Image: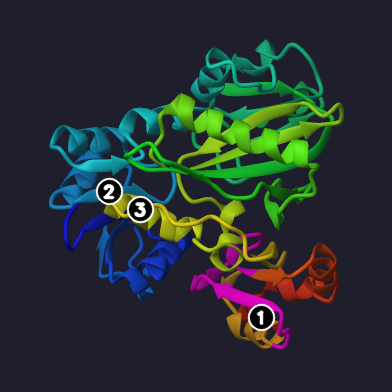
Amino acid sequence: MQTNPSIGILGGGQLGRMMQEAALPLNIRLRFLDPSPDAPCSAFADQLQVGNWKDASTVAEFGQGCSALGIEFEDVSAEGIDQLEQAGISCIPASNLLQLIQDKSEQKKFLQRSGIPTLPFQVIHSVHEIQEYPCILKKAKGGYDGYGVKKIESALEFPTQWSGPFVVEPLCRIKKEISVLVARNSEAELAVWEPAEMVFNAQTHMVERIISPGELTLEQRQEAIQLGKDCALALKSTGILAVEMFLTEDDTWLVNEMAPRPHNSGHWTIEGSATSQFEQYVRILSGLPLGSTESTGYSATLNLLGAHDAEGAADEAKARQQLSRLPFVQLHLYGKKQVKPHRKMGHITVVAKTAQELHEHLSKIPPNFLRISSLSSKP
């Protein structure tokens, strides 16, 4: 462990920004690699290097001199990370884990081999291989946060602009979608946050709100936490692992996907937990002890998205004025200068003492307060 750790992060979007916000009280500064000089992390970054995190040589060069390297999302060069590991630099997650997660077909095969319950699946390269409709079609590579996922009723709905391979899954009668965040450090110590319930938009497949703790029985809660731990132990992961899972109508648990990093489903931990997922990641990258994952109350996260007609410079002022009137809301704007339909521009967190109080607060938030317009779309 270094006295003054030099931590590099691949990606400087909103997750990177929140990592740096969490690192500041620890007097730890992060370095970022991002293609955009105006990336959300630029407001706080000690150093922002403009470059392509998909390019192996750029990643390897960026990581030289770092005590540890982390990621903001999975779509980065695993080859570059492997080169840094060969040079003795701690990379979290490791390159082999990253390669596994980057390919949904390999991720599904891993779950199957490890005896972790998941939906049956088929790996295909063309529409002609699909055996049953309707089904859920997923891009094996490059899909994220609802993008690259589509329900199709027939071959006519196959997205011809997508390139394979693909993962095909049958439709599943789902009661709840749950996320469990697991932290694991280099000493193999585990810490788990309360399971959170995810509510998705039916059209965009993007998460609209997160409720923690999710509405589960004590037995279901314990099962979800154990399943999250099982995934982390099977992967031998270090860092933060988000395990997205389904609770089916017949009360069966099925793991959907995993992400080896801080995750949208864990934003509630900033105000809703003793240690946020972002601080925990910084702690792990720095060699510090794990922090407590105890909840501070009942929490909800609601995403602030670009309005359906938004295009151009973001009008954050309107959202700031509206949401600041609500005393129970904690506002997080990501500093993105450009807005477009459904783009994540920020989120709000609401924390309450009881589940009833939380839902009362949520009922007082007008839906239009959660949409960011563009200056050009103003009348």
Against 285, residue 48 (above or below) is: below
Q: Which residues are magenta?
A: 325-348
Q: CA distance from mark 2 to mark 3?
A: 18 Å
Q: Position of residue 326 (x, y in %)?
A: 73, 84
* Quadrant the C terminus occupies: bottom right
Q: Position of residue 111 (x, y in %)?
A: 56, 21
Q: Is residue 313 left or right of residue 24?
A: right
Dot 3, how many residues are within 10 Å of its Cα: few (below 14), some (14-19), or many (20+)? few
Give the camera-side residue of 116 and 144.
116
Against 364, residue 299 (above or below) is: above
Give the camera-side residue of 325 and 123.
325
Q: Which residue is mark 3?
A: 289
Q: Is residue 345 left or right of residue 298?
A: left
Res 69 label: 2
Q: Position of residue 17 (x, y in %)?
A: 42, 66
Q: CA distance from mark 3 to mark 1?
A: 38 Å
User: Magenta stretch containing residue 347, yes or no?
Assistant: yes
At numbered mark 1, what does the secondary structure look like: helix, strand or loop?
Answer: helix
- Which image quadrant for residue 185? top left
Judge depth for marks 2 and 3 and give the one in front. Answer: 3
User: Magenta stretch containing residue 194, yes or no?
Assistant: no
Give the camera-side residue of 164 and 370.
370
The amino acid marked with disc number 1 is Ala
Q: CA distance from mark 2 to mark 1?
A: 35 Å
Report the residue at 28% width, 72% height from top.
27
Q: Position of residue 295 (x, y in %)?
A: 62, 60
Q: Which residue is mark 1?
A: 319
Tell me which numbered mark, 2 or 1, is placed earlier along the sequence: 2
